[in-house]
Amino acid sequence: MWRVALKGIAAKKLRVLLTSVSVVLGVAFITGTLVLSDTITRTFDTLVVNVNGGLSAQIRGKSAFNDSQGNAQRNRIDASLLDAVRRVPGVHDADVSVAGLGVIVDKTGKGLNAGQGPPPLAFAWSNNTALNPMRLVSGTPPQQPNDIVIDKRSADRAHFVVGDQVRVVIIATKGVSAVYHLAGIGKFGSADSPAGASLVFFTTATAERLLAQPGKVDAIQVQADAGVSQNTLVSRLKTVVRGQPGVEVVGGAAVVQEGQDNFQRAFGFFKTFLLVFAFIALFVGTFVIYNTFSITVAQRTREYALLRAIGASRRQVTTSVFAEALVTGVVASLVGLGAGLLLASGLKALLAALGIDIPAGSTVVTSGTVTVALSVGIIVTLMASLFPALKASRVRPIAAMREVAIEDDRPSLRRTIAGVIVTALGLASLLNGLFGGGGNALANVAIGAVIIFIGVAILGPLVARPAARLIGAPLPSLRGVAGRLARDNAMRNPKRTASTASALMIGVGLVAFVTIFAASAQASIDHVIDSEMKADYIVSTSSQFSTLPPAVETDLRKVPGVELVSGVRFGSMKFAGSVKQIEAFDPTNIDQLFDISVSKGRLADLGLDGLGVYKTTASDHGWVIGSRVPVQYAKTGVKTLTVRAIYTQQALAGPYVISLANYEQNFTEQSDAVVIVKAAPGAAASVRPGINAVLKRYPNGKLQDRAEYKAAQAKQVQQLLNLIYAMLMMAVFIALFGIANTLALSIFERTREIGLLRAVGGSKAQVRSVVRWESVIIALFGTLLGLLIGVFFGWVLVRALSDQGIDRFSLPPGQLVVLVVLGAFVGTLAAWLPARRAARIDILQAITTN
Amino acid sequence: MNAVAQDPSQKRAGVAARAVDASKVYGQGDNEVRALDHINVEFAPAQYSAIMGPSGSGKSTLLQCLAGLDQLTSGQVFLGDLDITNLHEKALTRVRRDRIGFIFQSFNLIPTLTALENITLPEKLAGKDADPAWLDQVIEIVGLRSRLRHRPSELSGGQQQRVAVARALVSRPDIIFADEPTGNVDSKAGAEILGFMRQVVREFGQTIVMVTHDPIAASYADRVVFLADGSIDDELVGPTTESVLDHMRRLEV
């Protein structure tokens, strides 16, 4: 039977190739994702090792708890500990570490690394070459308070040379924008910069003043004598900090591990994001493979019957189909693996083009990647061929005597029941995930969506015939008899039409869903800005790394014509065991900047110990005005806040707010995510030059009025949307191959018919037209099913998120029409080769072969 | 027997189709097979001609070359005065659509179209409507009135072949080529179909050229051309089953 299967493959190379494409693409995507993320991870792991290569131990503040992003929150320690540390036996050398964010401003006034991508980092310079990975390539270390050293990459980008005056914006509590003297330029080891980050180094005293506060440092870095183990050193150092409960000592290896883990955690999202699309591609591929095997099994009914008639067992027939699937799966997975390596660089370029720059590094291909990619590809192929293989085994020997293989295409009750049950199960999982909450919410939603797609695919054949009739209704009058034949062909085998369309349905469904969701999110944002934002201007930045130093707010207050200004800061606090994000702003007159609809109490009363709470959050906890709420700050520990205001709009404020004064007392880092500005009546336009003058000193800040802010938000949403579209294109592409594959197989089946059509006077163009319009009908059927599901998913998600600020359901008609046109285009494209092939069928051969 | 004389409406004289020094060679060298060997043959308009011969005599090849479905290796094929030997694909398609009718042995119909739609298919492909009066007459001749809305799968083999005959007739082609039209149907249905074909030649001056290996089928024709080894062996005007059988026996010896 193996030989039969292998001969079958050899005889149908094109079919095997077309079937393989879906597996190849899916496996390539997975391989590309894994290789890319392994490469990036390895680059950062190496980086962390390099930064901490000479570090034997670190003394630093203990983290009370991790913030809502999972990052440790540490208090600074006294720099004066350094002397005691240096006296500890086994300590070769020690130096302080002060780190923060500082944007280098180039000669044209633009900030380097102020946007998305690698961060702008600032440090205290250390002369210890074991603890400081930087190597000067020109100039000297910083010696005067006004001296800086920057990395070579930034120096090259901005054309700075030693001796230049360089403006740096420090993003920290005492953050200022000032001009420094460029004393030196350094390389990070042998690289111009670590992974594209920009680096600026100050003297220790300047760094303490700018990034922390005088006498305070982030950590003390210790280099051990040769032969002294990290453990020994750590236990000796612990005696130095005994009696200081907020301070801890950790070994260098642990610091390296932490750094790598932190990166993994931050980066895990990105890897998951890519893998999701890889699995979508494979999911679509499963439909294509299933469909191809179904059709070929049906076409070979006589062959199987003959095998059975001459004594092959059912198991042998099943095995032969599986064998074909296995060979297809193995070959396609191997090709996919190779293509994935190419794709890794393609993905990197794609992300770079979308503004997510990834550092270079040699490509990492692990055995895990190879194993996962190959086994996923092979398993998916085998799974997809399961039903067709079983069907082949049920072919009865008598079928060998029949004239033609006829697929049973009557819609069966069994199919209806199965489809309804599966769809209902998917719905239940989806709704449970969206509205039931719980830890597995996201998984439930994803599984629910997958099951709904499968359920609709099962139900597809029930509606395929009437749907094709409807979609093809205008064809006979548009395209005459060719249109008529196209429509008839599309209606001819509803199972085939439906499962071919299903592949496209998934891609289009997801595209429609994200389009609708993005439009709804945008409509909600617009609504919030229109109805809740009272300020005239918003100053923001394009990166979480380059927030605005508080000096921006102070300086903006001095601009003539500016009436009200408030910075907005975010931080994490612990409420009854769970870490929550809170927002802080200046509560005096805040209602003139934000209207968050305070229903009880007053924001102006927040003071130093007041808490503002969103209505639903308050009622969930049973809080009323005057309720006392115990909280924990990372910096200052446990305190009690009193609920002083309850508000009903949380889109701008989030669930918890405190005053800026409170924030300044209890948080280590002080910088604003945005600063909002209201001009005096009638001065809205005239204050703009004044604000711009301030922002010249802080070039990472962007000034936007409300319309511009809305447009910028829309642009951000659109950017993310474009990335998702690009990823989903893969799924649509695979579906396109699926349609082409089905058409090719159908044409093979209809060779005689096509020959006859040509013999009685059908032109090549007419034959092509028949194939093309059948393809368009199938594609449009898939597109419409997808639209239906996409609209439903979008609607349900908006309902589920109405509590979190996305409460406007928006159907963008233009984009949805574009999607339908795109669907028809996919059909046309998919038909291109099959139609040519059909038109080239040799008439004589077609009508004379039996 | 002269069909032209019997039909006063027939004004065309001369030749409906002819092959001039027509050769068709497959393969090369030792493997060379001459399916047609310098054949010269003419088919008169408004006549029912049959081409007969043993298997491998080249009779189907001759028909296919006359109908523009296959290309000669050398020589020429004329349809009326039109030399179709070297016509381009598009022109050939138009000739098939507008001037030729086909009846094949089997798989004659498009399965998704009804009987009526199959009959009018060539007209539809040309973007025209069939002449309603003539269409009605054709349907009457082949006796399909009650079956027009049925699809091929709902018709018997004989009925399907009658649809094919009607389709060939309805565009009033210059010539109809039939390749073993009764090869796949029982003898009763076969006789009916041959009867219709003779009827349209007699009553409407239709030209038909038919390939067959069945002496009974050949006896319906006005004239039988016998082929052997790619050459014209003989011909018979006003054949009967017996005279055809005699000829065939002689050829096969």
Image: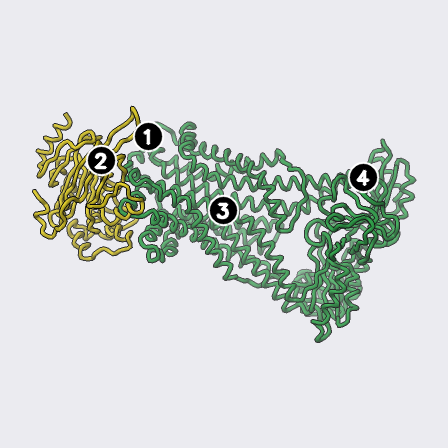
Chain in green in the render: A
Q: Amino acid at mark 2?
A: Ala
The residue that label 2 is drawn on is B22
Say yes or no: labels 3 and 4 on the same chain. yes
Amino acid type shown at disc 4: Gly
For disc 4, the marked residue is A251
Asked if residue A202 can be seen in this view, the reply is yes
Q: Position of residue A796 (x, y in %)?
A: 54, 58
Query: Which one is nearer the viewer's eye here, A48 or B67?
Result: B67
Circle 2: element type: strand
In primary-sequence order, the first of circles 1 and 3 is: 1
**SS of the residue at dot 3?**
helix
Residue under numbered circle 3:
A733
The alpha-carbon separation of the residues under discs 1 and 4 comes to 75 Å
Q: Which residue is mark 1?
A: A309
Q: Residue A671 is drawn in which quadrant?
A: bottom right
A473 versus A245 height, above or below: below
User: Cβ–Cβ below 8 Å for labels 1 and 3?
Assistant: no
- In front of the other: label 3 or label 4? 3
Q: Colour of chain B?
A: yellow
Q: Chain of mark 1?
A: A
Query: Identity of the amino acid at label 3?
Result: Phe
